[in-house]
Amino acid sequence: MSGMRRAPRLSHGPAAIVSSPWIVVGAGVLVMVVLLVMALGAYRGRSPAPDGAPVPPVLTLPTGVGAPSVPGPASSPPPVRPGLSGRASGLPPSATAGSRSPSVGASGGGPVVTRSPSRAPQGQPAMSGRYRVVQSFDGGFIGEVSMVNRSAESRGWTVRLEFSGGRLVTAWVEGVPQGTLRQSGDGFTYVSGVDVRPGGSVSLRFHLERTSSTPRVCTVDGVRCGGF
């Protein structure tokens, strides 16, 4: 029958896959599902620890033991009173030195310790001096009068030196402000420029030429020097 039409044939192979895209999508979904199932099975079948591997012990704190205590800031030491130490008690060292004369205060408290001022020994001048030659050289020498204040108060001083002839080059005081120099006759007088504290010392030096190194007169505040 020439007037009847034939039904179209279904194509097979790659052409059929291209013409039906749902087949590709379905195959891809199926592959992803299979891979997901395999991955889940492998994860579940994995052992948490290999056979024979030691299991770390679980540490537990005994009952009643709390968290370790954190040391707090160190406490500051108690204030120290001047003259007293933390190991000893009683009077400060300054109060025990020298002579002490206990007396009762007006408030009726314990004895009050006082220090008696030091004084020069009986018959000894308050300011004593000693003469010596520091250095000798051709044509002159350098002499010195060293003095000590043995009294209980600061004092000034006056030195008088006389030689047989000669010439005074200069005179100076070691370590303290300079005083006043006055020349007269065969000697000179030096008056201190600063007082000497109790128990302190001071030295007057001088340079003389063309004379003997032994003075005819050497006095400190009118008292003869020692040392020659």
Image: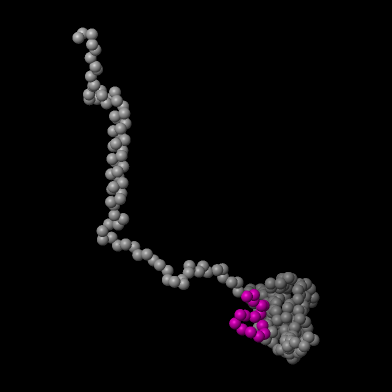
State the predominant SS element of the stretch in magenta.
loop
Which residue ends up furthest to the left in the rendered image? 1
Does 112 lie within the magenta span?
no
| Residue 211 quadrant | bottom right
Does 79 lie within the magenta span?
yes
Which residue ends up furthest to the bottom in the rendered image? 122
Which residue ends up furthest to the top in the rendered image? 2
Give the colouring mode of the picture.
one colour
Which residue is at the front of the view, 38 or 217?
Answer: 38
Please identify the quadrant where the N terminus is shown: top left
Looking at the rendered structure, the number of numbered marks drawn on it comes to 0
Read off the magenta span.
Answer: 78-92
Q: Residue at x 29, y 25 (%)?
A: 20
Q: Residue at x 22, y 24 (%)?
A: 12
User: x and y percent of residue 77 in the render?
Assistant: 60, 74
User: x and y percent of residue 227 in the render?
Assistant: 68, 84
Residue 178 seen in this snapshot: yes
Q: Residue at x 77, y 82 (%)?
A: 221
Q: Residue at x 62, y 80 (%)?
A: 85
